[in-house]
Amino acid sequence: MRKRYYYLIRVQFLGFRYSGWQKQPGQRTIEGMLHKTLKFILPQQKFKILGAGRTDAKVSALDAAFQLIVEETPISNITDFINLFNNNLPSDIKVLIVKYIDKDFNIIKDSKSKEYRYFFSFGEKNHPFCAPYMANILDDLDIDIMIKAAALYTGTHNFKAYTAKPGENKQLTRTITSCEIIENTEINASFFPKRSYILRICGKGFMRYQVRMIMGALVQLGRGLLSIHEIESSLLEDTEIKISYVAPGSGLVLHQLEFE
């Protein structure tokens, strides 16, 4: 049996140019770019990548992770490997940390907490340079009622109204440890609007589109197309409400990922 070596790699990326994390034929993806680069810097060496989860098209990450399994020959010098990896990756992907892990580590099951942040502005069209970093809602929004409603998502709820295909998710009941809308003081640039906001949400795990659909429901509330009562009802197991608006991917950032 071939000897295998296991590594946990922390990575950042700006997702605006990519069709999500997962490798797809004919598409530029984060996993595909990582795999292509590893193939170049680890020539004639067998390896495998396992991601901590899938991000959608245009979604970014400040703290993503993947598991690298290398056969036969271990990485001899971690610092040199990080430098070589980064020198050959495009400028919108950066490796932060590489560390040895036990072979029993499960990058999916051992996830302890994920924090997402959704950056958005509203009311006026943004400078085009904002597009990779925040969603731009052109309608006026009632931000006060959105701030009030965001707190309703904290706790354990049935989120079947917040997934595109409920049948694909066996576990529709999820626990959100915190959910709030705050004013954006984290990222800034000369071309940013004077005021922008962040939906900050944290939990053990999320279904596909769940965070973007929570943001979508809050935007519909801010537009006056949903009520607070409908937001509350959407979190019940027997709800008939279906959230139809999925907020754009470009505002979403995986902010922090913790493991057991």
Image (spheres, rainbow, N blue to C red):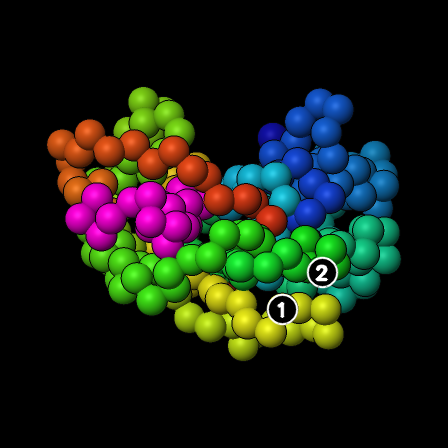
Quarter of the figure with residue 71: top right
Q: Are marks 1 and 2 in contact (CB under 8 Å)?
A: yes
**Given the image, on which type of amino acid does mark 2 rest?**
His
| Residue at which label 1 appears | 193
Q: Is residue 224 magenta?
A: yes
Provide the residue span drawn in magenta. 211-230
Query: In the rendering, which numbered label is found on residue 127?
Result: 2
Instruction: Mark 2: give few (<14), some (14-19) or many (20+) Cα within 10 Å.
Output: few
Quarter of the figure with residue 82: bottom right
**Given the image, on which type of amino acid does mark 1 rest?**
Pro
Q: Residue at x 61, y 39 (%)?
A: 57
Q: Residue at x 24, y 33 (%)?
A: 241
Q: Earlier in the sequence, mark 1 or mark 2?
A: 2
- Tell me: residue 209, above or below residue 200: above
- 241 relative to 23 in the view: left or right: left
Question: Could you tell me what secondary structure mostly forms the magenta stretch?
Answer: helix
